[in-house]
Amino acid sequence: MLFELRQYQTYPGTRDRLVDVMEHDVFPFQVSKGMVIVGSFVGEEDPDAYVWIRRFDDEAQRVAQYAAVYESDHWKNEIAPKFADVLMREKINVTRLIPTSLSVIH
């Protein structure tokens, strides 16, 4: 198993709009391409923080699913433009994680 911890920072006051885009556009589309969304979170103390986690079986699956999602016309033309005024792209932090033997998520 391979996980991605994706940490985003939104422009002030736009986090709820990002959550809406993620839950109504991004997640359904990515799941339709085989991606597994493990969780979605907002910061309790940071009103502009948003975090989500994806799971892949291995690197080959991650590469194939990235291509299916991010190289698609639907992503480029319909979904990606929705991030322009809510997401601080320069502050995106992606951490790849491998679960330890006692991790409750696999």
Image (tube, helix red, strand yellow):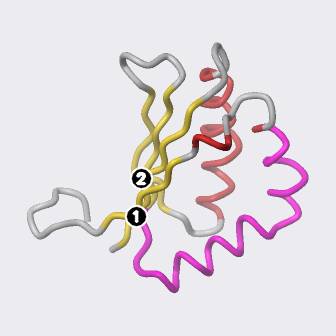
Quarter of the view holding residue 105: bottom left
CB contact under 8 Å: marks 1 and 2: yes
Q: Position of residue 96 (x, y in %)?
A: 40, 64
Q: Label 2 amino acid?
A: Leu
Q: Quick check: 36 above or below 98?
A: above
Q: Quick check: 73 above or below 79?
A: below
Q: Quick check: 60 above or below 16?
A: below
Name the residue beneath numbered marker 1: 96
Residue at the image point whose x is 67% and y is 20% from the top: 14
Q: Give yes or no for residue 34 being in the magenta stretch.
A: no
| Badge number at residue 19 | none
The first of marks 1 and 2 along the sequence is 2
The quarter of the image holding the N terminus is: bottom left
Residue at the image point whose x is 37% and y is 16% from the top: 45
Name the residue beneath numbered marker 2: 5
Characterize the local packing of mark 1: few (<14), some (14-19) or many (20 or more) Cα atoms within 10 angstroms: few
Characterize the local packing of mark 2: few (<14), some (14-19) or many (20 or more) Cα atoms within 10 angstroms: some
Q: Principal SS element in the magenta part? A: helix
Q: Position of residue 7 (x, y in %)?
A: 48, 43
Q: Label 1 amino acid?
A: Arg
Residue at the image point whose x is 80% and y is 57% from the top: 75
Residue at the image point whose x is 75% and y is 38% from the top: 83
CA–CA distance in space, label 1 to label 2 = 6 Å
Q: Tell me which segment is drawn in magenta.
A: 55-82
Q: Position of residue 30 (x, y in %)?
A: 63, 59
Q: Give yes or no for residue 67 being in the magenta stretch.
A: yes
Helix, strand or loop under label 1: strand
